[in-house]
Each structure stands twice: as C-alpha cells, then as structure tokens.
Image (spheres, rainbow, N blue to C red):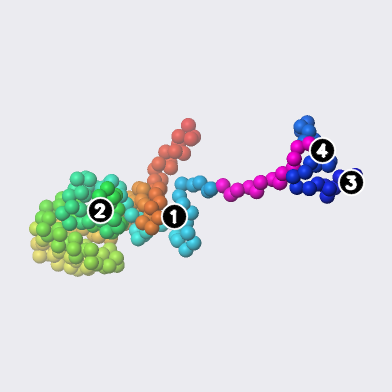
Amino acid sequence: MSGTGDETRSGALCAVHVPRAGRPLIGRPWRPEPEAEELPRLGRFPAVQPGQPAIERLAPTSALVGYRGPTACAAAGITYRQLDYWARTGLLEPSVRSAYPAGAQRLYSFRDILLLKIVKRLLDAGVSLQNIRVAVTHLQSADQAGLTGLTLMCDGATVYECTSPQQVVDLLNGGQGVFGIAVGAVWQELEATLGRLHGERTDTGETLVGHDPGDELAQRRNRAV
C-alpha cells in the first residue's frame, strides 16, 4: 500500500494515518476542515469610506465636525441655560442639528460657537439683546474671509462693523466704540480650544476625540513616576 491518500474517499476511514500527539485517529471518519469565517472587525470607529477625509485630520473648522451643547458651552464660556434659552428664542440656533424631533441632541458648527462666543462678549459689554440679534443676523450672512477680517466696536448701545484699521481709528476719534472684538482673533482662540475637546462627525456620527497636549504631558509624567 502506497499510503498516498489516493485511496481515501470522502466520508470513509483513512487507510493510513500517523497518530498525532499520542491520540490515535485511525478509525475516525475524515471530514474536510471547515473554512475559516471572517470575524467581524471591531474598533472604536466604523471604517472610513473611500473618498472621506481621515478622521484624525479633520480640523475643528471643518463642515464635517459638529459639537454638542456641553462642548459648545465650554468653548464659548456660557452656561447651558443661556445656550438653551438662545436656541429656543431664535437668537442663535444650532445649524447642524436642532433639538427636534424631541430628544435629539443639538449639534453646533464651529461658526455657531464662534457667534456664541461673540454674543457672550457683547452681553458682557452691555449691548442689548435687540442689537445683538441684528449683529448675529449680519454675521451669519458673511462669508469666512469677510468674517475673520471684521472688528466689532460697540459703545454699550450700538454695534459698529469695521473692516479696516482706519475705520476703528475713526470710531475711536469720534468718541465711539469703547469696546472692540477682533473676530479673527476670536476665531483662532476658538479653533485652539475646540481642538482639545470632543466633536462628532456630521456624516457618520463618529466621536472625534480632542487632543489636549496638557493631558498627554500629564500621562507621560505619571508613567515616568
């Protein structure tokens, strides 16, 4: 007998089989090995579809990133009560996702939170909500380039829009504009803040974990101890 295995038929006994690990297999029916099934992939985030930006590379200003109410409050320096009131009264509603249908989580864009931050500063300067509503409506219609180049000046009653340093000087020389907000500076400050906080992808709902260099440094120090 050659022992090549040609004599073996599916479902019959093996003619010759060398025992393995001391366990004789002669006399046991041979069955083909089952094909290995592909196990489901587990991970923190679903796979990114072709053509989508990499999750880790999304900037806080990206239209694909939204922020929930508590994060918007922390970044803008306001209370959740203020946020809720302004949304319900129409002063500044979230542009990504509102609270309707009931139970849905509000989702704010970077631009929304920028305006929240500006509203807070105007309130602190004593500007009335009526004038703030006018300013917010105007800022919402401005494009990004025009928005970051603006300086808002206010005297506690009126908000003035300045698009050049000379206009700021003219207001100050005229005795107006005792308080100024450089929108571009607020933009940069907010971008750095939101980069350390958690966001959410608007297309897939994935959680985007913020990167806080301070936390990373603390973890390294703890590991070194």
The amino acid type found where label 2 is placed reads Tyr
Q: Which residues are magenta?
A: 27-39
Residue 216 visible in rendering: yes
Residue that appears at 10% across and 65% down: 174
In the image, 31 versus 217, the foreground residue is 31
Circle 1 is placed at which residue position?
A: 55
**On the image, which quarter does residue 157 sit in?**
bottom left
Could you tell which of marks 1 and 2 lies nearer the N-terminus?
1
Q: Earlier in the sequence, mark 1 or mark 4?
A: 4
Give the dominant element type of the magenta stretch: helix, strand or loop: loop
Give residue 131's quadrant in the image. bottom left
Which of the two discs, 1 and 2, sits closer to the camera?
2
Q: Which residue is mark 3?
A: 2
Judged from the image, the secondary structure of the residue bearing numbered disc 1 is helix
> Real-space Cα distance between discs 4 and 2?
70 Å
Check disc 3 and report its element: helix, strand or loop. loop
In the rendered structure, which amino acid carries the disc numbered 4?
A: Val
Numbered circle sitting on residue 100: 2
